[in-house]
Image (cartoon, rainbow, N blue to C red):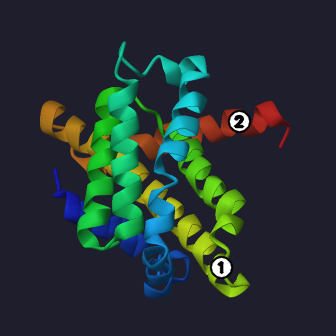
Amino acid sequence: MDSMHEIARTAIDQTPPACRVTAEHAAVIATNANALVAWGPQIAMGFYDTLYGHVPTATIFHEGERPMREQTLIGWWERTVRGPIDDDYWAWMAMVGLTHVVRRVTNPMMLAMADYVAEYVSINSYRLQLPEADRIRLVEGFDRVASMTRSIITYGYDHAMSAALYERAGMPEALLARLGDQTIREALVDAKSELGL
């Protein structure tokens, strides 16, 4: 399996530059880090209230682990707002994709919760009392952090699954891709029929 830095770099390279976190985004986030860090416990509480309030996501967790999970999220939040948002940060997000595979956190679960954090920032950005241009850049920055995090985690998740098939079953990724394409083409015919297209 590729290193976490390689996985993150591949996902970033596939992301159009206009959709990536820029130095301006990272700067406006870091400039407001002290105020943003204080939001960590509120974000963690709402985040895990949401997860524990939904049976499919609640079943991911073990008895009594919520305080530890909340602290992990608060740590991620602080690292995100204090920065730097660099290659090591994105490699960490690739590792999170592997953690999700092991914990059976599905991509739909992760995608929704990345949106939860970005939406929290958007809704609460007024609390920072920033000039409008800085507030907009901050909200956009967190949207892009969430977007790139989603991209890297999903790519890492998918890459881990195909690499595991190769390493354990000897199925090369190219063969897996061809077999997947064939199966998906057949599923598309069925889907178009189902939808009357």
Q: Residue 41: horizontal and vertical position, in percent?
A: 48, 44
Q: Is residue 139 visible?
A: yes
Which residue is under mark 2? 191
Q: Which mark is residue 36?
A: none
Going by the picture, which residue comes out furthest to the right? Answer: 196
Which of the two residues, 178 or 105, is positioned nearer the viewer here? 105
Say which amino acid is labelled 1: Leu
- Dot 2 or dot 1: first in sequence order is 1
Which of the two residues, 159 or 53, is positioned nearer the viewer here? 53
Residue 92, by quadrant, is bottom left
Q: Residue 2: horizontal and vertical position, in percent?
A: 17, 56
* Up-down relation of residue 189 to residue 4 (above or below): above
Which residue is under mark 1? 130
Question: In the image, what residue occupies the spot 51% across and 20% down?
Answer: 58
Q: SS for tag 2?
A: helix
Residue 118, by quadrant, is bottom right
Q: Residue 131: horizontal and vertical position, in percent?
A: 69, 85
Question: In the image, what residue occupies the spot 43% across and 41% down?
Answer: 180
Q: Nearer the viewer, mark 2 or mark 1?
A: 1
Which of the two residues, 56 or 166, is positioned nearer the viewer here? 56
Q: SS for tag 1?
A: loop
